[in-house]
Amino acid sequence: MTEVRRQKSDFCSLFSVLCLLFSVFCFLSSCGPRYTFPSGTVPKSIEDICKKEYNIDVTARVVGKTVGALVYIDSVMDAKGQVPKEVNEVMGKVMLVVSRVALSTDLPIDFCTVLVRDKTHANELVIIRSLDDTKRANADALGIEESINRTLLGQAKYELVPGAKPLFVLKEIHQETFLADQMVQRIRLGFAKDMKDDVDRALVLVDGNFEEIQGKKVFRFSVIALKAMDPKELILSIFKVVNEVLAGYRFTGFDTVEIQDYLNRQKLVLDRQTILNYQQKKISEAEILKRFLVESQSIQEAFKLFGFNVPPESSDKDAALAAKPTP
């Protein structure tokens, strides 16, 4: 399945799962006592409720402030490489149970995770939600579209060893990495919507993460646009998404944001105060580009980042020409 089709499938899956989640948010917000599930009973409570109410066998774990559940099904993809409705329903039901328990326990929980694994092909779907986002949705502080944007949906492969029981190691989710992954997802889906066809969509690659380097906390994003696009508009569009997420979560636990356009060899580096000034309308987009957009590093680094091999003796000019799409 191509990256573009995968992104479309991700968006459809998100919408289906979120619609199911919203159908019972009112129920969740009106559940009885505040702490129905004592901290020591959280995993077993999730497993018992999934089995009793939905006849779904899950294994639940708690790591740090992340609670998660794993469920195995026959197949997570249909013949066309899409996520079937039945799989979306399983994901939604299990996430409902995980959220329900997380909302009604004295155990400090920040994130809920559901993993759905294919029994035979080692495919894995992962959905992650912030518990605070769920609370805000319950209070009608978030709409459906924004809740979809705030929900992470990923696809991966897990290790399947014949005759051995697969391991379930729940990954602890941290706010910084959750926001970085959400920014990347929003940027990719934004480009997928704006491009006119699948060919155009396949020519824009975006990645990003959160790193701590020498005591500095950095959100770092990289883009390769193998089609004609205004370099400044490209970087600015990515910055707007990053800023929207930071402002939406009122997150200030970072030092800088870096956005690198490798093919055009441009880099935007903004410190926290500059971004806060932008949010308060103290600095314009034009001024940001004028003051903080600089020339970036070699184009060869871009191809290494995205998994392409460029001969070390190749010059930047040669690499750029090789990367240019054929009209």
Image (cartoon, rainbow, N blue to C red):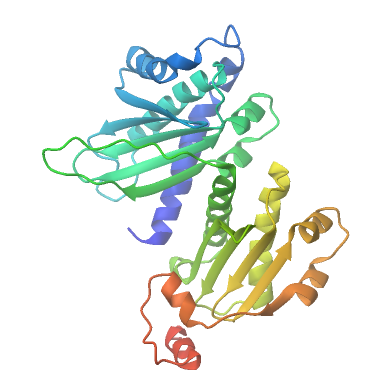
Q: Residue at x 52, y 22 (%)?
A: 102
Q: How many marks?
A: 0
Q: Residue at x 53, y 36 (%)?
A: 129
> Where does the image place residue 207, in percent across and percent down from the top left?
51, 62
Q: Which corner quadrant of the image does residue 28 belong to?
A: top right
**Relative to residue 261, is residue 171 drawn left or right?**
left
Outermost residue on the right side: it is 282
Q: Residue at x 31, y 22 (%)?
A: 56
Q: Name the residue nearer the viewer: 88 or 179.
A: 179
Outermost residue on the left side: it is 163
Q: Is residue 191 above or below residue 164?
A: below
Q: Name the residue nearer the viewer: 131 or 25.
A: 131
Q: Is residue 248 above or below residue 86?
A: below
Q: Is residue 9 above or below residue 324?
A: above
**Relative to residue 230, is residue 111 drawn left or right?**
left
> Where does the image place residue 323, in percent across and percent down from the top left?
44, 83
Outermost residue on the front side: it is 214
**Relative to residue 167, is residue 294 drawn left or right?**
right
> Where does the image place residue 111, in percent across and percent down from the top left?
53, 33
Q: Which corner quadrant of the image does residue 210 belong to?
A: bottom right
Q: Can residue 111 be seen from the camera position used here?
A: yes
Q: Quadrant of the N terminus?
A: bottom left
> Where does the image place residue 199, in percent across and percent down from the top left?
44, 70
Q: Can residue 77 be seen from the camera position used here?
A: no
Q: Which corner quadrant of the image does residue 2 belong to?
A: bottom left
Q: Name the residue nearer the viewer: 246 or 54.
A: 246
Q: Is residue 69 above or below residue 180?
A: above
